[in-house]
Image (cartoon, rainbow, N blue to C red):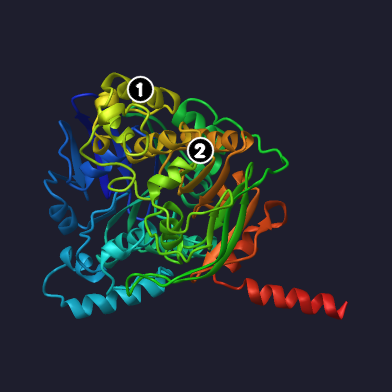
Amino acid sequence: MTARLELAGISKQYPAVKANDDIALRVEPGQIHAVLGENGAGKSTLMKIIYGAVQPDAGRIRWNGQEVVIRSPAQARALGISMVYQHFSLFDTLSAAENVWLGLDKSVSLAEVRERIRAVAETYGLDVDPERPVLSLSVGERQRVEIVRALLTKPQLLILDEPTSVLTPQAVERLFMILRQLASEGCAILYISHKLDEIRALCKNCTVLRAGRVTGEVDPSSQSNAQLSRLMIGAEPPRLRHEPRPVGALALELKRLSLEKTSPFGTSLQALSLRLNAGEILGVAGVSGNGQQELLAALSGEDPRAPRGSLLLFGQDIARAGARRRRRLGLHFVPEERLGRGAVPTLSLAQNTLLTRTEAVKAGGFVATGQLRRMAEDLIARFGVKAGAGAQAAAKSLSGGNLQKFIVGREIAANPKVLVIAQPTWGVDVGAAAQIRGELLKLRDAGCALLVVSEELDELFEISDRLVVMAKGRLSPAVPVAEATVERIGEWMSGLWEEQGSAQEAARAEA
């Protein structure tokens, strides 16, 4: 069979690192082919070469048996290649529909694009409002727009980078059904994910990269997670030790917090109540766009409109306090958006350390640059961040996973009393994810109170002591992880906890 895509000898050298080194890859029509590798292994560079966003230094690309030079994403789309980036390529000031329209034949009207988006979104179980400006969307909602945009082009080759990080377990199963259907119709799929269980369930072919080179080609369905991890990172990820511990004093409390949405496309918060104690991890599950953004803004101090008395930190009313005062009281925050929120893209890692850490700022506002550089270097070493230029590397030069490790590490190393963290391991490889989760557990064991907002249910079950679900701007009752199931949490993501609670009360009354 003629390969849909065939790469031979693909190499790409950057000033500080060889991202791709003599890579060969073959993908046939109808094949769902996984590409695995740790952060910085060269996966993103390789995908950008296929999509025409980056030009290789050496090597050949054959498309449907013909040698081609793909000089731009527009040329790639014309050939039939679509890609969903890990770092999104959307214009903030345009609507979702206008962003999709940019990549389509202009003979199609914007009104028709809106209808096609609604139809595809409904088919795939992806909640996308074509009228919403991208700047009003959460990271998860932006990813849905990217997925729908790619699917609208009816591609011959679909490249998906971490596509399920915003979906409920039920929606993941539905997406897998659609991908299998696309494959049965001849579409080739390159699937990048750090979720090894997904790859083993979905893919029969897998190319593994390490340090820019191919280290193996296997059938992932015949491999264990441990075997795949060894191919990716040369070892199995460390096992986490999550042991029950007595909790400490009340650290953070929400008392019927209600906030009206600030944009027509936001989500209003409705009488949110929760209690978070020192020495525990409270996980917040839910599909992106159900109020998580608004809750995080209220907790971090970005939105200071909370009614007085509705938000308490160690008994102090911080509802109207700014982010700086909250940090001084011991509350630190990791946003879900890495570039632009967690880090300034053009600044070095050392300079980005200053965003939330002031140890190197001396009297009169002078910065001890040597101390600042050492702080950044310590973070790079402690969290295994791959940055070619070290502390002087620009944030935008790092892979998504490596930048995530740096940002999370920056806040963990501050020894917070309360840590609010969103999507802690989004786009991070299995080894780094285990390391970050292990560090979060160490913080918890040291007495820190952690609120973890994540769409990775496996992650929440692994590290949380209790779970709540956010749906339609409301919070479910908290449930100990030992009493929670994936099915129950998945149902609660639709806001069904009240119905479940009523049914259980009725059953108890009949008994």
Helix, strand or loop for disc 1? helix
User: In the rendered view, would you say 151 is above or below 231?
Assistant: below
The residue that label 2 is drawn on is 416
What residue appears at the point 20 percent right and 43 percent down from the top-left corner?
62
Give the labeled residue for mark 1: 377
- Could you say where residue 307 lies in the image, as x and y percent from the top left? 47, 66
Q: Is residue 213 left or right of residue 97?
A: right
Q: Is residue 112 above or below residue 248?
A: below
Tag 2's secondary structure?
Answer: loop
Earlier-in-chain disc, 2 versus 1: 1
Amino acid carrying mark 2 in the image: Pro
Q: Please tell me whether residue 164 is drawn above or below residue 43 in the rendered image.
A: below
Label 2 and label 1: CA atoms lie apart by: 20 Å
Does any portion of residue 37 appear in the rendered image?
no
Residue at the front extreme of this rendering: 364
* Residue at the image point whose x is 37% and y is 71% from the top: 121
Residue 84 visible somewhere in the drawing: yes
